[in-house]
Image: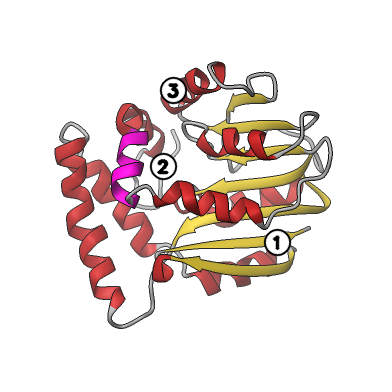
Amino acid sequence: MTRSPKNTDVQALFNKIAPEYDKMNNIISFGTHKLWRQKVMARMTFPNGADIIDVATGTADWALALAEKSDETAHVTGLDFSEEMLAIGQDKVDISDYSEKITLVQGDAMALPFDDAAFDIVTIGFGLRNLPDPVTGLKEMYRVLKPGGQLVILETSQPDNPIVKPLWQLYFGKIMPVFGKVFAKGKYTEYKYLDETTEHFMDYMTLGQVLLKTGFKKVTISRFNLGAAAVHYATK
């Protein structure tokens, strides 16, 4: 059983919210999560025949976007520990134009079931904060990345603007859990937990420092929506 530091069984949580996950992502982010991914990928380099892994792939949205962006000889692996999320993702992959390019795998982000230096690109979107030990997860991503390969982390963050921050806290702390209750069949507790992981996750500068300590190089950071999300780019 994979538990968070708050002793929450996160695998069971994501299995429970899987049926409404895509709908809730659109509602909570007002659809901007798709735009964020497009902006992130516009700055990425995709070598020919790239081996790519999307860690904590969920319902495979980013895996599908990576398959679309990369060339026809590339291959995308999507890994997640929630079988219910992967089942929904597999349905989406099967009806896409990229079913031959994408393999979905159930596994633990903190013990990736792959050889050292297996991938040219490692991505993780809105998943790092849900790992019981994000640093262990980053070490695993470093291990499976090829020398010179790219790591890209897209994650919720905390605005530091004194005007914006209280509004952000109100939205994530009070409004978002109510959305879970109204639009996700009463799942107030689950979305309250997701708010707490956002609120207590390391800030974007601390994450950048952790990446450097882990061994990554050329760490650059961009922020979206007045600091509500941040993307970290790094190389091995």
Going by the image, does 235 lie left or right of 15?
right
Name the quadrant of the N terminus.
top left
Query: Of label 2 and label 3, which has the lower sequence position?
Result: 2
Left or right of 91: which side holds 115?
A: right
Say which quarter of the image contains residue 47.
Answer: top right
In the image shown, does 92 or 192 lie closer to the viewer? 92
Q: Is residue 225 left or right of residue 223?
A: left
Residue 234: image location, x then y, percent:
70, 61
Q: How is the image coloured?
A: secondary structure
Q: CA distance from mark 1 to mark 2?
A: 28 Å
Disc nearest the viewer among 1 and 2: 1
Task: Label 3: state its secondary structure.
Answer: helix
Residue 207 in picture, x, y percent from top left: 56, 67
Q: Amino acid at mark 2?
A: Arg
Q: Please name the residue that numbered disc 3 is placed on.
A: 88
Q: Residue at x 23, y 61 (%)?
A: 171
